[in-house]
Image: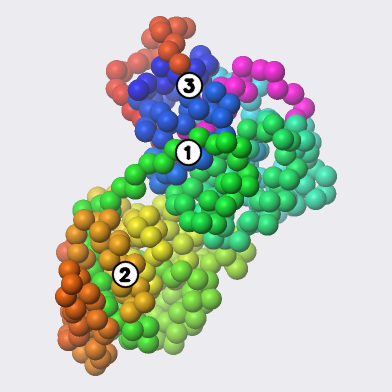
Amino acid sequence: MTFEETYLNDNILDALYDMHFEEMTPIQEKCIPQILDGHDVLGVAQTGTGKTAAYLLPILSMLDDGNYPEDAINCVVMAPTRELAQQIDQAMEGFSYYLPNVSSIAVYGGNDGGRFDQELKSLRGGAPVVIATPGRLLSHLKVGNLNLARTSFFVLDEADRMLDMGFIDDILQITKLLPQDCQKVMFSATMPSKVRELAVSLLHNPVEVKLKVSRPADKILQQAYVCYDPQKLKIIDHLFKNGDLKRVIIFCGKKDRVKDIDRQLRRLKINCAPMHSDLSQQERDEVMYRFKAGMVDVLVATDIVSRGIDIDDIRIVINFDVPHDAEDYVHRIGRTARADRDGQAITFVNERDVQRFMQIERFLGKEVEKLPLPEGVGEGPAYQSDGKEKKASGRSSHCGGKGRGRGGHGRGRKDKGRDGKKKQAPES
């Protein structure tokens, strides 16, 4: 389905034409008509599916059509991190190229006073679209820098990450200030019970759109160790002693576990750094800078970095614990094997996580290779597969294996250098 087959207005279509975007992605095809028709929408889709355009395009089209107050914040887009807020703001610039009266401002923490003053000036002037992280927006709201009483659209992007990062109270405080008739859109890559509860409390009779989770890239070598918790650090020590490992992310389900593992890895002389929700935005930025620059070999992180952060040269992902579901597993290991590179994903499966990992294998449609435990680590727990019990023991080699219809309204767009190529609007 093409964008011209929707109710998006001519100015939006002109911008998309100039950007050579014609064919909609599945999430855009399902969400854009529903948002244009005024429905609340709950979208479940992975990063990279085009969800940013799925909500920005219809909202910008309606704002450009008019009948919205010029001195109000007409749309608020909430994002969990400064990086995502900046990405959304960049996408907004392209999509709104022919919309002179629809502008945006990105509001996020980790900046100096000059940035805050700039935000304040734009907010008091009534920026039509505000793209913000929860903490920073709440700070402006508390001192009276903006009013959401006449806001018409509210978007909550990456809701699961918001909850993982502890923003639930901030979100609830912000949404209480919205008018009853505000149209709300909520996107999440996964749908755990807490996200479902948030959707029930925020959305009114939403249309639910869920895309099937893609399986991991074939270039990712997936392996697992079946082991007891005390054996996990011994396995990591073995892997690093038997290979010059760099560009590694170790994922853990809880921030306290991240802190503990980071301390223990430092004792093993492993060059690592932690990433979790207790760090300030400035601290997170510093950790990511050092990791991207190669100053840190291993990033020990919660799921706040399993989505939305592009690092193309990750060699190995280690799941210190089994993710809650297949979606989380796909997002975690999807940090490796990017940009046509090979990658490796290793998961530690303890006796309590066997059934959960077997569910992930059923989603994958294959059994993940179980590596023998390194010599001296001891025998691992049983792994039951196809009715048979297996013991994880013996030697292993080191890490590093192979890894509604518009017709032909036109308005002169054919004079803009159309090259005939069909592309899909990106995930920004």
Quick one: 255 or 111, which is closer to the camera? 255
The quadrant holding residue 245 is: bottom left
In this rendering, is residue 46 above or below 14?
A: below
Answer left or right for 351 relative to 133: left
Q: Amino acid at mark 1?
A: Glu
Of callouts 1 and 2, the N-terminal one: 1
179 displayed left or right of 92: right
Q: Would residue 92 be seen by someone viewing this image from the given angle?
A: no
Residue at image coords 66%, 22%: 101
Precedes in sequence: disc 3 or disc 1: 3
| Residue 35 spot, x, y in % from top left | 53, 28
Query: Dot 2: few (<14), some (14–19), or many (≥20) neighbours within 10 Å?
Result: some
Give the number of the disc on residue 355. Answer: 2
Task: Mark 1: give few (<14), some (14-19) or many (20+) Cα within 10 Å.
Answer: some
Q: Which residue is mark 1?
A: 208
Prevailing SS of the magenta stretch: helix
Look at the image and say whether residue 392 sits in the magenta stretch. Answer: no
Q: Over which residues does the magenta segment extend? A: 52-73
